[in-house]
Image (spheres, rainbow, N blue to C red):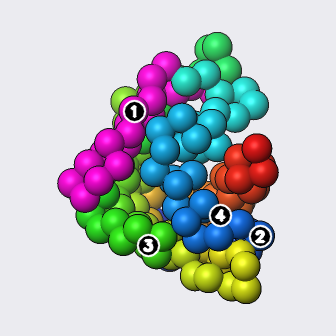
Amino acid sequence: MIELAHHTFTVERVYPQSPAKVFRAHADTAAKRRWFAESTGFIIDSYSLDFKVGGWERTRFRYGEDGPPMTNDCVYHEIAANERMVFSYAMTIGGAPLSVSLSTTELHAEGKGTRLVFTEQIVHYGEQDIEGRKDGTRQLFERLAAELNR
């Protein structure tokens, strides 16, 4: 029987751009693909985004040419323009479940910029390194910063 590991974590990041600009980087398919899916070493087999309540985001990818196929399937449950997104997503690796999460991205005006507050409630299938997931999330938000500066 596979062990389950439950975790909750929050990552915060301040960007000098407005909540509207940070929100657009989540809503625009080309921008989201650049900062969310594309990264050194990852091969993107497919990416699609239907950014609306009830919509989805799907990524099919591998790490390296010989890496096992991985998936990330997301459903958007609430979208409040320039304020927040509530979504759930499931990941697999080599066809086996890796994790399922409920996540919230909140955007708060802070001066002329934005404080992004990301909270994730996650269940991992098997023992997983939660610090690794948190670090990966921080790296995503570093790539978002680069996208916002494009």
Residue 106 in view (yes/no): yes
What range of the chain is rendered magenta?
45-63
Circle 1 crowding by C-alpha within 10 Å: few under 14, some 14–19, many from 20 = some
Whole-Å distance between the Cαs marked 4 and 3? 20 Å
Residue 90 screen position, x and y as percent: 36, 49
Instruction: Please check the rendered image and state whether residue 49 is part of the magenta-colored stretch, yes or no.
Output: yes
Whole-Å distance between the Cαs marked 3 and 2? 18 Å
Circle 4 crowding by C-alpha within 10 Å: few under 14, some 14–19, many from 20 = some
- Quadrant of res 123: bottom left
Whole-Å distance between the Cαs marked 1 and 4? 24 Å
Does the CB distance between marks 2 and 4 fall below 8 Å? no
Q: Camera-side residue: 26 or 59?
A: 26
Judging by the rendered image, the residue that carries numbered circle 2 is 16
Q: Amino acid at mark 3?
A: Arg
Q: Camera-side residue: 68 or 74?
A: 74
For marks 2 and 4, give the one nearer the viewer. 2
Judging by the rendered image, the residue that carries numbered circle 4 is 134
Query: What residue appears at the point 54 percent right and 35 percent down from the top-left corner?
Result: 30
Residue 81 screen position, x and y as percent: 41, 68
Looking at the image, the residue that sits furthest to the left is: 54
Q: Earlier in the sequence, mark 2 or mark 4?
A: 2
Tag of residue 48: 1
Q: Amino acid at mark 1?
A: Ser
**Residue 4 to residue 147: above or below:** below
Residue 143 screen position, x and y as percent: 72, 49
In the picture provided, is 149 more to the left or to the right than 33? right
